[in-house]
Image: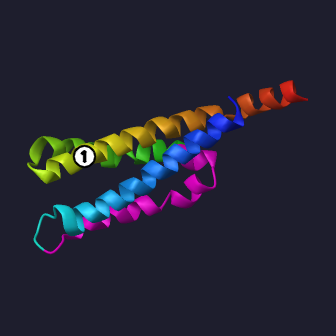
Amino acid sequence: MSPQHRAWAQRITVVSWLALIALCLAWELWLAPLRPGGSSLALKAVPLLLPLRGLLHGRRYTYQWASMYVLIWWAEGLTRAYSDHGLSQWLAGLEVLLTSTAFVAICYYAKWTRPSLLALEKQNAG
């Protein structure tokens, strides 16, 4: 795939990842916290910061492990979409959407940056 495809996959990943961090914080601090005034469940956004630098810099290895890492938040979103009610249920649905988008974009980025494909592109260009 072209460098533009890789750039789009990276952009979609980073935007959905940052939106997921913002959602986790807003959800548990202001929008629909478990306890009035905010909940310590907002700390679930902190582990999302671990792969952020690698995602921003396009490190293939980070994309590979982040594809499995993001599934933790996907499972949490599915669970809460099923068990919660009201606004929290809608926010859980949004979490599932963001994690699914990130997962697909991450997988495409990892696929399109595999060494064999990059070597083939370089060989065909030269």
Residue 101 pos. (x, y %): 41, 39
Near-viewer residue (100 or 43)? 100
Left or right: 86, with 45 as reference point? left
Residue holding disc 1? 77
Residue 72 pos. (x, y %): 33, 47
The magenta stretch is: 37-63
Q: Main secondary structure of the magenta part?
A: helix
Under mark 1, the amino acid is Gly
Q: Tell me the quadrant of the picture where the C terminus can be found.
A: top right
Q: Is residue 54 among what the camera can see?
A: yes
Asked if the stretch drawn in magenta spans residue 93, the answer is: no
Q: Bin the neighbour count of mark 1 within 10 Å (Cα to Cα): few under 14, some 14-19, many 20 and up.
A: many
* Residue drawn 58% across the image and 56% down it: 56
Q: Tell me the quadrant of the picture where the N terminus can be found.
A: top right
* Residue drawn 32% across the image and 49% down it: 73
* Residue drawn 60% across the image and 32% down it: 111
Q: In the rendered view, tell whether residue 63 sits above or below residue 34.
A: above
Q: Residue furthest right?
A: 126
Residue 28 pos. (x, y %): 22, 64
Q: Which picture quadrant has residue 21?
A: bottom left
Q: In the rendered view, tell whether residue 104 sits above or below residue 69.
A: above
* Residue drawn 72% across the image and 35% down it: 115
Near-viewer residue (92 or 113)? 92
Q: Which picture quadrant has residue 22?
A: bottom left
Q: Secondary structure at mark 1?
A: helix
Q: In the rendered view, tell whether residue 124 sits above or below residue 7.
A: above
